[in-house]
Image (tube, grey):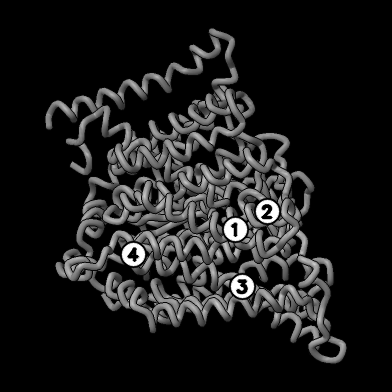
């Protein structure tokens, strides 16, 4: 039972990371109609810059701040130089150009930081664990990630529902020409939205830093999970991203934790572990396939067009 | 129009001649290394042509084509391991090293997987389709990474190539010509396919699916069959690649290979059959040459790709041959 609660919290934490990734990406998909494979690169940039600045300055908060600035800054530069030219192009062109960006950023981090993974320590004031229930200690850092994620989700909702900028973004998403004709600087809005998306990716990256190894190519494994989240949730829908991220986080974590136990009931333990590991890593894709059969446009399709 | 067609066929003939005499030239200069390099190029060309059938003619932008290449390769690897260790697969089927058994099986299994995956993916379109093909390919990738019995992450070594009557596949020259033979056969097959009624439906569904359905053609089935045929081509390339490198690893299913195949198709030119062959040649040669000067060649390749996408829309074959022949 305690194991189950711990795994659910772990699932929640993975779900939060995925939400930060997919919220930004689904906006870019939904609003600019552009498919961006390089979103994982900003996650990686966040993690690398965050780890380096934290190690040099000794301050985790400074590291996080640097990661956010680096991810958002690179994101906006990339939007102005490359992505902006691709909004009106076919998806194929967008896929290829952003694939080129991935190759570039992965190799650039290898040149700057080398091939060895960086280690990032949990800051002392977030170290240790807290006893949530009697006999259930849980790392403070992971709880902090969950809290930050929920705060970001609320902040995003406020931004879109309650501010002038949020209104302009929503208007730009439903009709670009009309919004521009009403005097809204739509190009600037697009750059800002893209920067917001990469900022969230950088946040996810730097928060994952102390949990995972910071290495070149780390963005791609999370990118694919993010795609699964977006396909499940529906392109362009932040609400879908929330639900999809939590579903994927839970199914993946719980599958890895409990499928081996389940399979040991039926097979000898050695082959059970091997089969369970394979099936667990496929679980979210099976979930995605099931949802697609049921609802080809995802759980919360944003546009009816 | 007339001139560009002759230019296109002139390039194709010149390319064909080049590939036909290459081993002879390489041997006479004592550079046998080129034979194995160009065998690899021919194999990637088969995969790229099959992807071009999907993307260039069918408009189905699959970012998971490596899955079928990997499946074909794993069929060769797994059957080899069972034959080598003398243990039957699932306790029933004996392993095999006979190319006449293994290769058709590799093609068949890749096609069946493509049929299943395609039947789900083709329910969607646009961005969804791209992401879902990618996700299913990654699913298979993680499946093979987890499969400890067949090497898991480290992959499988194949100690000798498959056997075939008359030919000796361990001879690089004979293997090269066999790859060339398969490439030519597949090119002819795809050429006839896209110019048949079937191909007309596929291309029609690409430009206006609603209209195709309005004239009473159930285009989903055609597209699914097209997806399976492309998957089969990937499987063939995978089986050949496993024999060429004598090694199989999950890396073959990884999405970077899917991306690279897509780059080959684009570099060569979409919807032109010889284009992907040219694209595969240029991509792999570029990789080879750049890797000689710097291990960080991808830092140059990435921006190069972005520039090609933004400025050279019709690929190199389009630049060389003019635009007239595309899709006629």
Disc 2 element: helix
Q: Mark 1 points at which residue?
A: A67
In 3D space, how far apart are the residues under numbered discs 3 and 4 (Cα atoms)?
38 Å
Disc number lying in front (3 or 4): 4
Q: Mark 4 points at which residue?
A: A189
In 3D space, how far apart are the residues under numbered discs 4 and 2 (Cα atoms)?
30 Å
Disc number lying in front (3 or 1): 1
Q: Residues within 10 Å of mark 3 (few under 14, many from 20)?
A: many
Percent across and percent down for residue A48 are 64, 52
Q: Residues within 10 Å of mark 4 (few under 14, many from 20)?
A: some
Residue A53 has which mark?
A: 2
Q: Mark 4 lies on which chain?
A: A
The C terminus of chain A: image quadrant: bottom left
Q: In this view, does B176 lie above or below A185?
A: above
Which comes sooner in the sequence, label 1 or label 2? Answer: 2
Q: Residue at x 35, y 35 (%)?
A: B268
Left or right, A81 with reference to A224: left
- Front residue of this view, candidates A148 and A289: A148
Q: Name the residue under label 3.
A: A283
Question: Is any atom of residue B54 visible in this view?
Answer: no
- Front residue of this view, candidates A168 and A136: A168
Q: Residue at x 53, y 48 (%)?
A: B256
Percent across and percent down for residue A119 are 75, 54
Disc number lying in front (2 or 3): 2
In 3D space, how far apart are the residues under numbered discs 3 and 1 (Cα atoms)?
32 Å
Q: Which residue is drawn at 37% across and 80% down?
A: A163
């Amino acid at each position: 039972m305690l194991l189950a609660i711990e795994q659910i919290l772990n699932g929640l934490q993975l779900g939060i990371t995925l939400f930060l990734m997919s919220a930004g990406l689904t906006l870019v998909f939904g609003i600019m109609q552009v498919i961006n494979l390089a979103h994982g690169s900003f996650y990686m940039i966040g993690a690398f810059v965050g780890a380096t600045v934290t190690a040099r300055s000794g301050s985790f908060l400074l590291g996080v701040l640097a990661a956010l600035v680096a991810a958002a800054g690179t994101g906006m530069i990339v939007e102005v130089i490359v992505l902006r030219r691709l909004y009106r192009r076919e998806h194929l062109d967008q896929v290829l150009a952003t694939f080129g960006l991935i190759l570039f950023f992965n190799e650039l981090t290898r040149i700057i930081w080398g091939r060895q993974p960086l280690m990032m320590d949990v800051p002392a004031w977030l170290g240790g664990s807290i006893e949530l229930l009697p006999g259930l200690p849980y790392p403070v850092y992971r709880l902090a990630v969950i809290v930050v994620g929920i705060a970001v989700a609320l902040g995003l909702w406020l931004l879109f529902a309650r501010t002038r900028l949020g209104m302009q973004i929503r208007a730009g998403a439903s009709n670009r020409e009309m919004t521009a004709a009403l005097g809204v600087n739509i190009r600037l809005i697009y750059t800002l939205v893209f920067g917001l998306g990469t900022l969230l990716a950088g946040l996810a990256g730097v928060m994952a830093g102390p949990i995972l190894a910071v290495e070149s190519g780390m963005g791609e494994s999370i990118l694919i999970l993010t795609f699964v989240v977006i396909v499940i949730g529906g392109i362009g829908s932040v609400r879908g991203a929330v639900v999809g991220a939590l579903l994927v986080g839970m199914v993946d974590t719980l599958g890895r934790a409990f499928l081996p136990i389940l399979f040991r009931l039926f097979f000898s333990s050695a082959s059970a572990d091997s089969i369970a590991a394979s099936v667990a890593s496929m679980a979210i894709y099976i979930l995605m396939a099931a949802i697609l059969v049921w609802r080809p446009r995802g759980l919360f399709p944003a546009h009816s067009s | 129009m007339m001139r560009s067609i002759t230019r296109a066929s002139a390039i194709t003939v010149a390319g064909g001649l080049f590939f036909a005499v290459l081993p002879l030239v390489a041997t006479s200069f004592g550079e046998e290394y080129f034979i194995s390099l160009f065998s690899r190029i021919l194999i990637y060309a088969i995969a790229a042509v099959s992807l071009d059938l999907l993307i260039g003619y069918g408009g189905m932008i699959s970012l998971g084509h490596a899955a079928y290449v990997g499946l074909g390769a794993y069929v060769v690897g797994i059957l080899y391991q069972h034959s080598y260790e003398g243990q039957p697969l699932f306790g029933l089927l004996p392993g095999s090293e006979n190319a006449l058994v293994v290769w058709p099986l590799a093609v068949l299994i890749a096609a069946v997987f493509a049929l299943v995956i395609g039947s789900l993916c083709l329910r969607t379109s646009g961005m969804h389709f791209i992401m879902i093909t990618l996700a299913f390919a990654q699913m298979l990738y993680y499946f093979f990474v987890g499969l400890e019995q067949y090497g898991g992450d480290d992959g499988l070594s194949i100690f000798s190539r498959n056997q075939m009557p008359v030919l000796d596949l361990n001879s690089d020259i004979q293997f090269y010509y066999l790859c060339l033979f398969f490439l030519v056969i597949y090119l002819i097959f795809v050429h006839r396919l896209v110019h048949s009624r079937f191909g007309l439906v596929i291309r029609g569904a690409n430009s206006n699916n609603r209209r195709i359905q309005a004239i009473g053609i159930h285009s989903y089935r055609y597209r699914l069959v097209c997806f399976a045929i492309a998957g089969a081509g990937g499987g063939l390339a995978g089986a050949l690649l496993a024999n060429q490198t004598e090694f199989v690893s999950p890396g073959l299913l990884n999405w970077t290979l899917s991306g690279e195949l897509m780059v080959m198709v684009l570099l060569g030119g979409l919807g032109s059959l010889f284009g992907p062959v040219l694209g595969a040649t240029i991509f792999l040669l570029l990789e080879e040459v750049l890797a000689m000067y710097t291990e960080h060649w991808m830092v140059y390749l990435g921006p190069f790709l972005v520039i090609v996408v933004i400025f050279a829309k019709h690929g190199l074959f389009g630049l060389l041959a003019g635009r007239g022949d595309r899709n006629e």
